[in-house]
Image (spheres, helix red, strand yellow):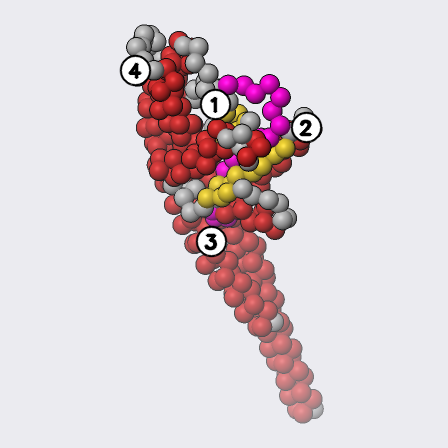
Amino acid sequence: MGAQIRVYKRRIKTVSATKKITKAMEMIAASRIVKAQRKVAASAPYAGELTRAVTAVATGSNTKHALTTEVENPVRVAILLVTSDRGLAGGYSSNAIKAADLLTTRLKAEGKDVVTYIVGRKGVAYYGFRERPIVESWTGFTDSPTYADAKRVAGPLIEAVQQDTAEGGVDELHIVFTEFVSMMTQTPVDKRLLPLSLETTAEESEAVKDKILPLYDFEPSDEGVLDALLPRYVESRIYNALLQAAASEHAARRRAMKSATDNAEELIKSLTRLANAARQADITQEISEIVGGASALADATAGSDR
């Protein structure tokens, strides 16, 4: 019985150590969510004003641009999938991958060839294990992306859209990422980035609300302005997606670590009850042995007196 108590104590010690780790990770993730939300809010004014400027150029001129012109019969499509570099975030990465798989299936059903670009080690590992082709991947910054990271990702994608499909280019660019709705809700979404779809997030709309769209004089030309603004616009869209994904990753990790901590507490309580029951059984057995020995000794003493 003593050996069983030692086993319970050893397991309680191990689970307690794990609980400390998961609790620490939960607190770290909670603090990083706030920082990620602040970054999303800070990026909104720039993205909103940039959207307004691009809208003015795109709607105020008849200039056709490779990033704004719809292809009549698109044959090749690129998908940018945003996952995480690290695990312990519940179903965060797997849900984004499932959304990308659904989008891929839908696009292929429309007769389009699909090529994939991936952000995050989890997505790269998933596609690599299944031997699925990846055009290009980026890792190492998913939990705290910068604008430089977004620019590095956007470069090859913009170049692919500007190229002819016969030379390896694509007709459309879609992005799949996890949108941060609240601390408890993060939703995988897919959006088309190119050809240009002028849309704003709720934060960006609030940042430029009630502002009148100004009249612009384009110098040196409409096309020159679009050449300068459109890459910045795409970079801002990708940057916003990376920030949303980072906030979602931290929220998913906090929730997963809280669940792990709660489960560890329940397991410790259960093991403690089992250890106490084993200890009580051990004490009861010892008392029974003492009482039995005393009774046998008393019977032996009574027999010798007769």
| Disc 4 element | loop
Q: Position of residue 196 (x, y in %)?
A: 48, 21
Mark 3 surroundings within 10 Å by alpha-carbon count, few (fewer than 14), some (14 through 19), many (20 or more): many
Q: Position of residue 84 (x, y in %)?
A: 48, 43
Q: Which mark is residue 111?
A: 2
Mark 1 and mark 3: Cα distance apart in space: 54 Å
Which residue is at the front of the view, 296 or 108? Answer: 108
Mark 4 and mark 2: Cα distance apart in space: 41 Å
Whether pointer 1 and pointer 3 mark residues with C-beta atoms closer than 8 Å, the reply is: no
Q: Is residue 168 above or below residue 47?
A: below
Mark 4 surroundings within 10 Å by alpha-carbon count, few (fewer than 14), some (14 through 19), many (20 or more): few
| Disc 1 element | loop
Q: Does the segment drawn in magenta span residue 150?
A: no
Q: Which mark is residue 19?
A: 3
Whether pointer 1 and pointer 2 mark residues with C-beta atoms closer than 8 Å, the reply is: no
**Residue marked by disc 4:** 219
Q: Does the segment drawn in magenta span residue 86?
A: yes
Q: Which residues are magenta?
A: 69-89
Mark 3 and mark 4: Cα distance apart in space: 62 Å
Q: Residue at x 54, y 42 (%)?
A: 135
Looking at the image, can residue 210 be seen? no
Q: Is residue 212 above or below residue 154?
A: above
- Closer to the camera: disc 1 or disc 3? 1
Mark 1 and mark 2: Cα distance apart in space: 22 Å
**Residue marked by disc 1:** 66
- Closer to the camera: disc 1 or disc 2? 1
Q: Which amino acid type is shown beneath numbered disc 2?
A: Gly
| Disc 2 element | loop
Q: Is residue 153 above or below residue 196?
A: below
Q: Is residue 293 above or below residue 176?
A: below
Q: Which amino acid type is shown beneath numbered disc 4?
A: Glu
